[in-house]
Amino acid sequence: MNATPSFTEMLGMYSGLEDVTPRIISLSDDDLDSPKRINQQLAEGVQRGQLWLADYHDNSLYVLIAQVNDDPRMATVIPLSTDMRAETSDSLVISDTPLEKPMLAWPKLATVIPVRCLYKPLKEFSASVTRAIVDNNLRGAGSRSGIRRGTTHIIPDNVQWETREDALAVLVQWHADCFNLPKLHGDAQVEYGTDKNLAAYTQALQTELRLSPAQRIAISRGTLQLTEEQRQQMAAAGFPSQPQAQTVIGDDYLIMAEQPQWREAADALEQTHQGDPRVQLAHKAQFELAARVSGHGQQAIEGALQKAAEIALDEAADAHEK
């Protein structure tokens, strides 16, 4: 029997390691954690067959995108798990997955959730495997698909059913958030519903207070406030309060702002506690940045949102440093 080495001998085993040059192993572009791959899939948008880590309201789940709904702010998803102890009779066991490890899926728990719940894209299943899971039908999957129907095993503490029911509870909570999404306006384009007194008020800012165009614009946007003396002057001129311009955020901006591509910026804005962060992004993109972006249609909208997201992240970083 070999004697256990002493502490000094063990240290000697590692002597000379300081002379060894460490070798940094970089991630391949196809690695699950590769920033390049993640950004590329985020830019492609939410699509059928993708595997995502969803994380929202302090809960997380693996989900398969079964379909993107007519309203692209929502998608039908199927929950999955890597805990193979959770196998149940209504689950599918999938051996070949984007995670390169077996997973369980519960097709009968398919639920519509907001795509804002999606956090990290994890590649995608093949078309045949996706179809088998979504349809809960293995006939067209092929013998090499690596999918089989699950069976319920007797496990202490009912771990399998607990995992399944936990997933269902999370999905129900996320589904409820679908009803809190900002209302779309159908065919309505970018519109401005303006208080009839706003034009007269703006004119009075010039005639009564002698404010410059830049000052008048700043007041209308709320970035500059009148002094008490100026408010009294405006009240004497017939404007005791400032008329408000009502703006309607375009549907295209609201839809684009919900996409997981802007999740990091939305999370940063959420810390300001100033309302729905996705609406903040959409509003900033449409009314402050759209005119500065080149291109047309979706390209211009995405460009404006990209700038809005960058500003939100920069402001969050500055606030953190302070």
Image: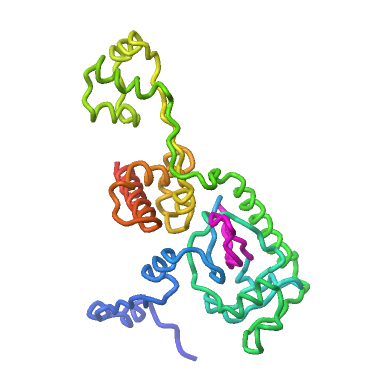
Q: What's the magenta region? A: 58-78
Q: How many marks?
A: 0
- Give the x, y percent position of residue 205: 28, 20
Q: Is residue 81 on the magenta stretch?
A: no
- Give the x, y percent position of residue 162: 71, 62
Q: Is residue 70 on the magenta stretch?
A: yes
Q: Which residue is at the front of the view, 4 or 258?
A: 258
Q: Main secondary structure of the magenta part?
A: strand
- Give the x, y percent position of residue 52: 53, 66
- Give the x, y percent position of residue 283: 41, 42
For this orientation, the residue located farthest to the bottom is 1
Q: Is residue 148 left or right of residue 62?
A: right
Indicate the colouring scheme.
Answer: rainbow
- Tell me where residue 192 sits by quadrant: top left
- Tell me where residue 113 sits by quadrant: bottom right
| Residue depicted at x 46% and y 90% | 2
- Tell me where residue 315 sits by quadrant: top left
| Location of residue 119 with respect to 35 vertically, above or below | above
Q: Is residue 321 left or right of residue 196?
A: left
Q: Which residue is at the front of the view, 56 or 11?
A: 56
| Location of residue 195 with respect to 156 vertically, above or below | above
- Image quarter where the C terminus lies is top left
